[in-house]
Amino acid sequence: MTDKSPPSKSAEPKLRAAERIRRTAHELFYREGIRAVGVDEIVTRAGVTKPSLYRSYASKDELAAEYLRDYEAAFWERFDGEAQVHPGDTRAQLLGYMRGLSTRATKRDYRGCGLTNAAVEYPHSDHPARKVAQTHKRKLRTRLVEMTTAMGARRPDVLADGLLLLLEGAYASGLM
Amino acid sequence: MTDKSPPSKSAEPKLRAAERIRRTAHELFYREGIRAVGVDEIVTRAGVTKPSLYRSYASKDELAAEYLRDYEAAFWERFDGEAQVHPGDTRAQLLGYMRGLSTRATKRDYRGCGLTNAAVEYPHSDHPARKVAQTHKRKLRTRLVEMTTAMGARRPDVLADGLLLLLEGAYASGLM
DNA sequence: CATCATACGTACCGATCGGTAACATCGTCA
DNA sequence: TGACGATGTTACCGATCGGTACGTATGATG
């Protein structure tokens, strides 16, 4: 309403409806779980209609995958953000992320890691959502090995696995 | 068919149908997730019919809660089993459980902790399944504090939380 | 003004969800 | 035998699921 600006020269093919759906789905999927949220509820709360959803997303599963891609992007923003706060100091970067995580995980609306949760909800590896989650966890492990290597760890992969254990433990413990 | 033995003098009020449902539900709920499994699939695979399910269980949610109670019983069996293998040695008991867990968690059909998974699927604390999960995790923490106290830890609760983090991390890491 | 594509809404679809009513059948035990 | 409790059979319910055919508003361009 208050935004009467023209669509500008943005190269984005998607406009307002798709974005509203995207954000509403993100919020609902994270808070209630993907399976627990129907497409009707999404479009209702987004103030749009169902055909608008299916014009931008092939299926609910694809919308879920998109949600997870957004979630992953936000994760890397937080994670890599520490690299800029503590340039060169890998150990401080990790500790920085852990500290931020512990802060977030103790908030009342924390519901764990959206990617891990999706893997719980969709155990089959051929599901779009599961694929995003699985790929991300692999990337994260690779990243952690790079970091522990840079730290000069004697057994970088073992340390990386330990860190992964700690991270997942913090995610899971935060949701209860 | 091959089992023609009479129901014996067992004091169990429940017979064959309820038990078949119980075990089938346990397997399906753990493997596919609770929300992913419909009651029709359960009764079909159990070789019974829907009315039989609802004669023994008030609702699907209650059946899910029952599944989690069974899961929890199996957990304590494993966990307390270590107390008998290493009597008096609390540290060895914990390590023993961790070792057993790491073995199970690396198997291909491992799908994480059923109780944690249920908490992911049902975020609302008024849900029967969620209640079972939440209560269990609290009991486990209490138990861990007792053990770390017995071990003479300087800060038993802090160590217990650390162990809880490790456990949940192992559960979550095992499912991907 | 007429045109035309883009974006959106109305109304509906078949399938499946959890759950139930009513009745037939079976085995057990008195 | 007769009565009873547990189970199976069949058919059904309203609600909700994910998904779609088709008409309508809008806004820029000729």
Image (cartoon, coloured by chain):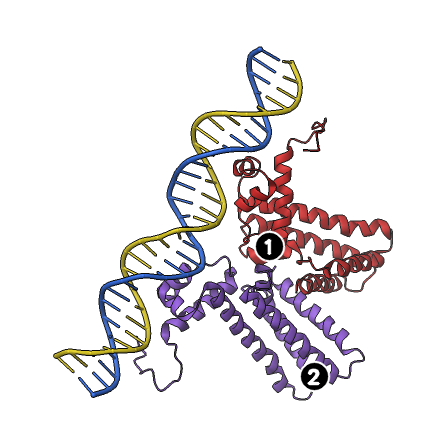
Chain colours: A purple, B red, C yellow, D blue
- Residue A90's disc is 2
Asked if both marks, 2 and 1, belong to the same chain, the answer given is no
- Where is residue A59 drawn, in percent x and y? 45, 65
- Residue B32's disc is 1
- Where is residue A75 drawn, in percent x and y? 57, 75
Quarter of the rendering occupied by the N terminus of chain B: top right
Quarter of the rendering occupied by the C terminus of chain B: bottom right
The amino acid type, in three-letter code, at marker 2 is Thr
Disc 2 chain ID: A
The amino acid type, in three-letter code, at marker 1 is Glu
- Residue A174's disc is none
Q: Residue at x 68, y 77 (%)?
A: A142
Asked if residue B82 lies left or right of residue C7, the reply is right
Near mark 1 (Cα within 10 A), the count class, few <14, some 14-19 or many ≥20, is some
Q: Relative to B22, is B172 above or below?
A: below
> Distance from label 2 to label 1 (Cα)?
39 Å
Near mark 2 (Cα within 10 A), the count class, few <14, some 14-19 or many ≥20, is some
- Let me know if residue A98 appears in the view: no
> For residue A105, which quarter of the picture?
bottom right
Q: Residue at x 68, y 57 (%)?
A: B109
Asked if residue B65 lies left or right of residue A64, the reply is right
